[in-house]
Amino acid sequence: MWQEFFEKHSGAITTRTGASEVDIQAAERALGVKFPSDLQNFLLVSDGLEGEYGLDLVWSLNRIVSDNLNFRGNNEFKELYMPFNCLLFFGDAGNGDQFAFPIQADVIRRDDVFVWNHENDSRTWAAPSLPKYLEWWLSGKLTV
């Protein structure tokens, strides 16, 4: 599935060498959440995805771990924003807004993608799945 997607959008994206299952499992342990299957499968094929102008549409596994730990542990953020332990950030819009999967009781129960607005702390539905998020972003249907 992902290979076909990459071929379809080859002029607009840059892929990377995939992450290992062991590394994905270590990331899940570090963050205390099992990644949705679409994200797991994506990372196995490409450890992140870069769009136009160097925009990280899907972060590398290392960035997923580091940014999520930073958002959850940043004391200044705790004073400014609602808690982030209900989100698994995985990409950004290039303007400070972040894309995330919702976490419920340490499990991602939905494939939906939400966008977190860094200016007003809103969390808004953006797409029904990772593939649709990427398709809609690359087609211009999804903007923030």
Image (cartoon, rainbow, N blue to C red):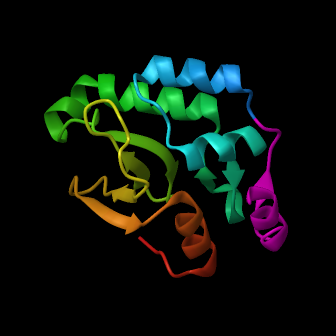
Q: Is residue 124 above or below residue 26?
A: below
Which part of the image, by quadrant, shows the N terminus?
bottom right
Where is residue 6, by image quadrant?
bottom right
Q: Is residue 27 above or below residue 125?
A: above
Residue depicted at x 43% and y 23%: 31
73 to the left or right of 79: right
Residue nearer the viewer, 46 or 82: 46
Q: How many marks?
A: 0
Residue nearer the viewer, 53 or 124: 124
Residue 62: x and y in percent read: 61, 28
Q: Check if residue 4 falls in the magenta segment.
A: yes
Residue 15: x and y in percent read: 79, 51
Q: Which residues are magenta?
A: 1-18
Residue nearer the viewer, 66 or 41: 41
Residue depicted at x 63% and y 73%: 138
Residue 104: x and y in percent read: 27, 39
Residue depicted at x 51% and y 27%: 65
Q: Is residue 129 above or below residue 84?
A: below
Residue depicted at x 31% and y 28%: 72
Q: Check if residue 133 falls in the magenta segment.
A: no
Which part of the image, by quadrant, shows the C terminus?
bottom left
Residue 114: x and y in percent read: 36, 58
